Amino acid sequence: MKKKRVAIATSDGRLVNRHFGNSENFLIVDLFSDGSCELICVREFKDKEEDCSNEQRIEKRVDMLKDCDVIVTNRVGLCALEKLSDKIVLERQGFIKDALKEIVELFM
């Protein structure tokens, strides 16, 4: 069975509702080709805007998500998108379950 590790920018665990560079939490799940998924963890970023530049925030997030195959976020800027060029990046709004279903349909 095929598997993809998915990082989801969310504030509540239900909705894709955060911008990549500003998301404080990413839900990490392993998604299987049969549509089932397993929660791996929630990765938290505790940086403050005044403590680092936008580019540093992006770098931290890219590095912390390097084991993920797919990034699902509300929006992603061009700088981040370039750094995520080896990933599948989906800009979506709405329920996480709908985004996961779409990933299975499109990429598995």
Image (spheres, rainbow, N blue to C red):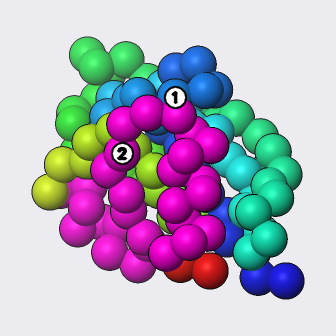
Q: Which residues are magenta?
A: 79-106
Q: Quickly name the residue at label 2.
A: 92
Q: Quickly name the residue at label 1.
A: 15
Q: Where residue 71 appears, x then y in whole percent?
A: 47, 56
Q: Where residue 83 appears, x then y in whole percent?
A: 30, 66
Viewer-nearest residue: 100 or 75: 100
Query: Helix, strand or loop at disc 2?
Result: loop
In the rendered image, which quarter is residue 79 located in?
Answer: bottom left
Can residue 17 be seen here? The reply is: yes
Q: Where residue 101 appears, x then y in whole percent?
A: 60, 57
Magenta-drawn stretch contains 99: yes
In the rendered image, which quarter is residue 42 located in?
Answer: top right
Q: Where residue 81 appears, x then y in whole percent?
A: 25, 61
Residue at position x 52%, y 28% in the image: 15
Residue kind at label 2, given as amino acid type: Arg
Other residues around mark 2 within 10 Å, as few (<14) / some (14–19) / many (≥20): some
